[in-house]
Structures are given as C-alpha cells and as structure tokens.
Image (cartoon, grey):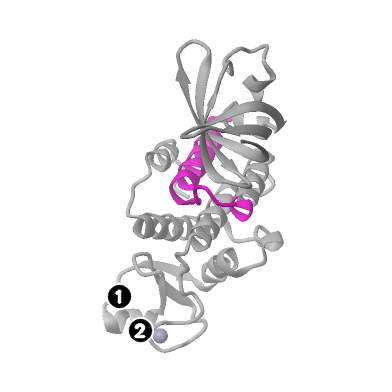
Amino acid sequence: MKFKTNGLILKQQNIGERDKLVWILTQSHGILRAFARGAKNIKSPKCAGTGLLSYSALSVFEGRDSYSVDEAVSIEQFTGLQRDIEKLALAQYFSELCLNLCPVGQEADEQLRLMLNSLYILANDKRPRAQVKVCFEMRLIAMSGYMPDLVMCAGCGEYETPEMVFVPHTGKLFCSACAERQGVQGVRLPAAAVTALRHAVYADADKLFSFVLKEELWEPLSLASEQYVAYMTQKDYPTLQFYKSMGNRE
Ligand SMILES: [Zn+2]
C-alpha cells in the first residue's frame, strides 16, 4: 500500500553504499522508520528530500513489516541551521525529544507544526535560542501527556508572588513561603519567569513564541524546563549535553 504525507527527517543511518534508513516525523503516521533506496546518490531528488532536517513531501510504500520512501521532494531545508553548529546541536536535541515523545503510527500534526515552527525561528534568529528551547521543551512535553500544574502555588493557592519555586520532578509550583515551610527543593523563578513558563505551556499555538523576557532570566527558566523534561521522560539526552558543552547554559 502506498500513501502520501509530509514529514521532517529526524535521523538517518547509512546502509551500504547507496541506501539509507531514515526516521521521519510525519503528519499522518507520527514517527516512521523507513528505507530510502538509492537515496545516497546525489543525482537523485530523494537525496535532498531525505537529508537531515529536510521537511519533505513524501510518497511512502507500506510493506508487510517495513516502510520505504519511494519519493521525497524537499520543501524546506532550514539552511540557517546547517551553517551554525550550535543551532544544529539544539535542533538535534529537538529531534531526539521528538523520537522519544512523538506518537508512532498515528497522526502527529500538532507535534510536526511545533517542530517546524521552532526550527524556522531558530534558523532565522527570530527569537533568542533559549526562548525556542524553553517553548519547544515545555510544549512538546505537555502535548505528550506530562502537563505541569502552573496555575497556582500547590501549597496555599496564591497565583503570583515575587519569587516562586518550580519542582521539576513533580511539575508543581510553590510560593517561596510554602517552599520554605515544606522544605521543597526546586528551581527558583522570579515572577516574570513564572509568567513565561505559564505562557510556554498554556498559550495558543500561534502565540507560543510571542513574549519577551529579560536576558538574565533565561538561565533559570531553561534549567527548569530541561529538568522537567528529563524527570518526566526518565532520560538523559546526549544531544543536550553536547549543546551545553559548547558553553550554552540556557
Ligand atoms: Zn504558597
């Protein structure tokens, strides 16, 4: 059976001289692992269409126990990422999160749109890198069923205090008084960073990246969101460690 869908190439592995195995985040089938025969031939349109981080129009053949890409035409290649090692490292972390969190065998339109928007903003410097990271992490993890509870202090119900404490292993928020009283450990966030964290989780998709934050607040916020993702998924991400090894603390 053959079907058409659009998808983003998240990972690739060479097979012999001519062929590739690719992991694709598709609109219709979520994460799809497929063979791409002859895709290493640079004269084949499939070569660009199955390249890393290419968003492509695909024609896929579904065999008895594997998929193969018959045609792949690149729609967008995010060249701004390929030219910058730090942006590329962050994009690879996003890909690793998608591979770990996106559905397999069911539609993933929302996740694909989030990933494409994030890559576009990252590639074209439309927002600070830390903002793309925090928004992507918090939104993808929330979509994946791990919704944090950021509405109010989990101890006393206060909506906002000058500083609050976010607890990455539970996704709960405490005002500083309750955190101290209950001995809660977590990431301390000034009110503006709490507002930004709430925005990343609760804002409409088309407004996701529409906010500004003082530069010095990105570091604690980014720490809060990456720790939340790591705790919820019970996993360390080598791609994130690599990104941070280049001196990116946020
Ligand atoms: Zn409280």
Q: Does mark 2 have its CB less than 8 Å from ligand 1?
A: yes
- Nearer-N-terminus badge (2/1): 2
Determine whether the residue tagged by mark 2 lies in a helix, strand or loop: helix
Q: Residue furthest left?
A: 183
Tag of residue 7: none
How would you rate the neighbour count of disc 1 (Cα within 10 Å): few for under 14, some for 14-19, many for 20 or more?
Answer: some
Q: CA distance from mark 2 to mark 1?
A: 8 Å
Magenta run includes residue 102: yes
Q: Residue furthest bottom?
A: 156
> Residue 124: percent from the left, percent from the top?
69, 40
What's the magenta region?
83-111
User: Residue at 51% across / 79% down in the picture?
Assistant: 151
> Residue 55: percent from the left, percent from the top?
66, 36
State if disc 1 and disc 2 touch (CB < 8 Å). yes
Residue where numbered disc 2 is placed = 178
* Amino acid at circle 1: Val
* Amino acid at circle 2: Cys
Determine whether the residue tagged by mark 1 lies in a helix, strand or loop: loop
Quarter of the figure with the N terminus: top right
Q: Considering only vertical position in the picture, is 125 above or below 110?
A: above
Q: Principal SS element in the magenta part? A: helix
How would you rate the neighbour count of disc 2 (Cα within 10 Å): few for under 14, some for 14-19, many for 20 or more?
Answer: some
> Residue 248: percent from the left, percent from the top?
46, 43
Is 183 positioned to the left or the right of 244 in the image? left
